[in-house]
Amino acid sequence: MNHEKSKLTPAFKATLLGFGYYLARTEVKIRIAPEAVKRMKGTIRRITSRTWGVSMAHRMDKLNRFSVGWVAYFGLADSQRAFGEIDTWVRRRLRQVQWVQWKTAAKRNSMLQKLGYEFGDREHGLGTRKRYWRASHLKPLEIAMSNAYWEAQGYKSFKGSWSRQRPA
């Protein structure tokens, strides 16, 4: 017996193979364990690393392979909100990578215009001094690189894969 892994705990605090359990009114439901989400985020951080000099298509391929497998394993979980939060976080990581790849303010502004973002009268573009992670949450980036943009780039969302896998 492994004394480090074995413990006596209530069922709602225990995890088994990356799954946890919770009580919803009168029934027990399955959730994704926080440790599994933490490991998943570590893997996605490696795939969406700003210093990994690969094309966005290659990065998207790696991300889609990982997400499809991860959702296939954790598809049993009743965690619609968790999958939505993961998608939101991954898209922000992707915006950050794209922002870094565009490098200069002129390139960023021209690419945002190509993606359909219209600069207002008071805006002079996005020569922001914010670092990459904070810049990835700017409204112009969220508008220009919307969910539809990432779907067109080939991103397979966690929540979409999960909802397709669920029985009706």
Image (tube, rainbow, N blue to C red):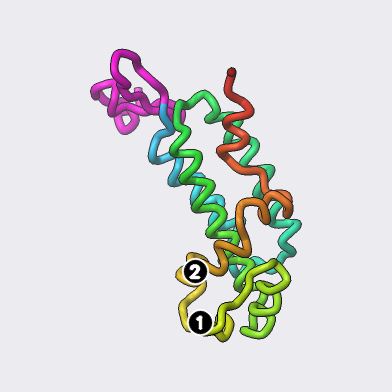
Seen at 32% across and 21% down, the residue is 24
Seen at 50% across and 72% down, the residue is 135
Of 74 and 92, nearer the camera is 92
Percent position (x, y) of residue 75?
Answer: 55, 28
Query: Where's the C terminus, which quadrant?
Result: top right
Q: Please tell me whether mark 2 sits on a helix, a strand or a loop.
A: loop
Asked if residue 61 shows in the view, the reply is: no
Does the stretch in magenta take in 18? yes
Residue of label 1: 128
Magenta residues span 1-30
Relative to residue 155, is residue 96 depicted above or below? below
Q: Quarter-wise, where is residue 82 in the image?
A: top left
Q: Main secondary structure of the magenta part?
A: loop
Seen at 32% across and 27% down, the residue is 14
Kind of residue indicated by mark 2: Leu
Q: Are circles 2 and 1 on residues that touch, CB within 8 Å?
A: yes
Mark earlier in primary sequence (2, 1): 1
**Residue 114 horizontal side relative to residue 44, left or right:** right
Query: Where's the N terminus, which quadrant?
Result: top left
Q: Please tell me whether mark 1 sits on a helix, a strand or a loop.
A: loop
Res. 138 mark: 2
**Residue 138 horizontal side relative to residue 156, left or right:** left
Kind of residue indicated by mark 1: Thr
Relative to residue 104, is residue 75 depicted above or below? above
Farthest residue, direction front: 121
Percent position (x, y) of residue 4?
Answer: 31, 33
